[in-house]
Image (cartoon, grey):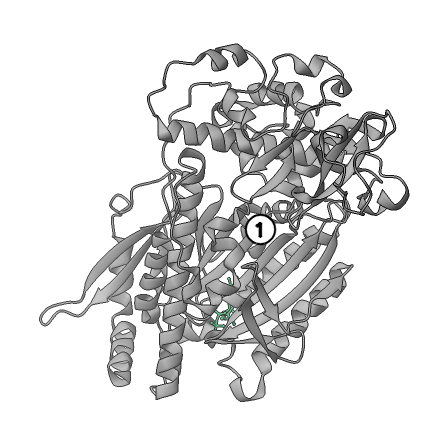
Amino acid sequence: MASLAITMEQFYIDNADRYNKLVGVFKPGPSSQKTTDPNPDMVVSARIRPMMEDETSQGFPNGVHPRTGSGNTNTVDLHELRRPPRGLPTLNSFNFSVDHVFGPDSTTAEIYDSLVRPLVPWAWGGGIGTLFAYGQTGSGKTFTVSGLERHVAESLMNGELEGERKLHICIIELAGQTAFDLLNSRKQISVLEDSFGTTQLAGAIEHHVTSKAELLDFIDAAASLRTTSPTLKNDTSSRSHAICRVRIENPALPGEEDGLLYLVDLAGSEAARDKVVHDVSRMNQAREINTSLSVLKDCIRGRAAADAESITKPGKKAYVPFRQSTLTKTLKHIFDPASSRSCKTVVVACVNPCLADVMASKNTLRYAELLRVPVPKIKAPTYNPAVPATWNNEQLREWIEKNSGTPAIHGSLLAPTESGPQLLRLPVPEFLSRCLKTAGVTQEQAHAFQAKFWKMHVDSSKAAAAALPRPAPDAAAKATAGTARSRLELLDCSADPEPGADAIPFKQRIRPGMVISWDPAGEYAMFSVGTGKSLASVLAPAGAVGDRVRDVLGGAVKSESGDEKYLCALMTPAVLPGAYDLNLWRQVVVSAEQMESEVLMEWDTATRYYYRTV
Ligand SMILES: Nc1ncnc2c1ncn2[C@@H]1O[C@H](COP(=O)(O)OP(=O)(O)OP(=O)(O)O)[C@@H](O)[C@H]1O
């Protein structure tokens, strides 16, 4: 095998002139892949590095050519030289299409500006931005990722992004099934899934960073450890995946998910021709790398397909095999369709243009093409006031201002340019931060409004998917027609079913199930949360229960005083942000005087919790 490779190399060198002549007269045909609409959340690019000094000095021609002219920036031509049994060598040509091709003269700054820069504000707003560099050994992955890391550090730390954030960095290396902390002397760590289904890097140390210099120091320390590890020198970087994770915490939204920025320098997809060693461990290593890269491809495609369908078919569950490799398990948040985190991903397929490596380059470009999932062409939807996915920016803003409670959230602050589908894709923390820009809006109102918007989308899509023939409206439905909430909505919401009830002060219509905010005094103060208030759901008038009934602190419920009192069940914050539990057996007596306001709550079947609504 090795001798065959050497003979082929000699053949390429001997026929370099003929090869260059054939390439010079090559007439490119149409691109082999149908052009698809670019997917803004999943961009696949190729970077062709320059020929290296040693490659040109040996006489190897350039085998990979970005197509130029007529504005074409996404096609690459690759030419092999075939050795026929008889006669002169001939050209065997292929072309590949991706979203962007960067030729040997392109700089890392250009790649950053056109593809990677948008990931930074996305993660700053609470989303997940990921960059993968893929390619054969020696194709420029580390060169590209380390250059991009510098630009990312600059963007994160130059003070241009809005709001305060706390940044934490962690850099790990995955070699086969084993993970190491590159910021802690390459100590072995474990990749575990906890009982909440979250992947934990057990044993890895996260470092808080406050300046660009500090961030770069960590990046450089990890890079030097990766490339100079004594026993693995020279081969370490090519046989392992390096994952740099920056976690971006927003102190103004403590309960929300943090933004995540991943920069992933993948293991070399194939051993370079001059490094092939056919021992068993090397073969096993190569098999593991190939498996992890193949699973990665399936996961990237799976997630892109799930995202593309999330707006049109939200009920449909995509299968993404992220548990099949340590790499994808580590990056679970990106791939798990159940995580519902908003992700933007960029892949840079790095290509070595030397003719001697053209087989590996062909595989890299084919892999890159496979990562592209066409975005379904959806004709402009017809406006439907009940379906957020059909709203343009103007319709969305109008709805926001009418439906976001008091004070009304400014549409221009929440959705300056977005359409309905675009706002649905916004990371939740970013949505909340934008709501809070309107003076007087509280976090609770922002949460409730976000939940209302999302629920409307889910309900409308489910209704469209079900497309069941509708029965004729019954008398009760007719009675509520025209009120703010449909009969169906009222089944899961604490709102008063009486049409027009909200015009009557809540104390004049207290009823079982109503949720109230109250001010617990004395020993009941232990039930207050945050603001000193507590939430409870009315069960019955205190006078309606037997003489021996006691509340949660053992006090008698029935009393001789003529005060208007109610037996209520406490509602307490649950583990999920913005969620509440109804504690049916933690009962308290609340007088009408202690009640401050009615709070509308909704039941969410998916999480089995109650949420505030507006
Ligand atoms: N665009 C580029 N311009 C100039 N030099 C480059 C470019 N890309 C890569 N190189 C050089 O090519 C060599 C190989 O690059 P690099 O180490 O980044 O490859 P790699 O794909 O990370 O390899 P490995 O998988 O072995 O880690 C390095 O000397 C690097 O400086």
Quarter of the image where the N terminus is located = bottom left
Mark 1 element type: strand
Give the residue at x 38% y 14%.
Answer: 472
Q: Which residue is mark 1?
A: 128
Give the residue at x 71% y 19%.
Answer: 509
* Image x and y of residue 37, in percent: 39, 37
* Image x and y of residue 458, in percent: 49, 33
Q: Residues within 10 Å of mark 1 (few under 14, many from 20)?
A: many
Reply above or below: 16 against 470.
below
Is 352 left, or right, of 595 in this rendering? left
Is 446 left, or right, of 368 in this rendering? right
Q: Between residues 283 and 551, which one lies in front from this camera angle? A: 551
User: Quick one: which residue is furthest to the left in this view?
Assistant: 86
Residue 577 in view, yes or no: yes
Residue 106 in view, yes or no: no
Q: Between residues 411 and 90, which one lies in front from this camera angle? A: 411
Q: Quadrant of residue 269?
A: bottom left
Reply above or below: 305 against 517.
below
Q: Quadrant of residue 444?
A: top right
* Image x and y of residue 100, in percent: 44, 47
* Image x and y of residue 187, in percent: 62, 80
Q: Is the CB of the residue bearing disc 1 within 8 angstroms of ligand 1? A: no
Reply above or below: 428 against 53.
above
User: Quick one: which residue is furthest to the front in this view?
Assistant: 547
User: Quick one: which residue is furthest to the right in this view?
Assistant: 522
Reply above or below: 39 against 106.
above
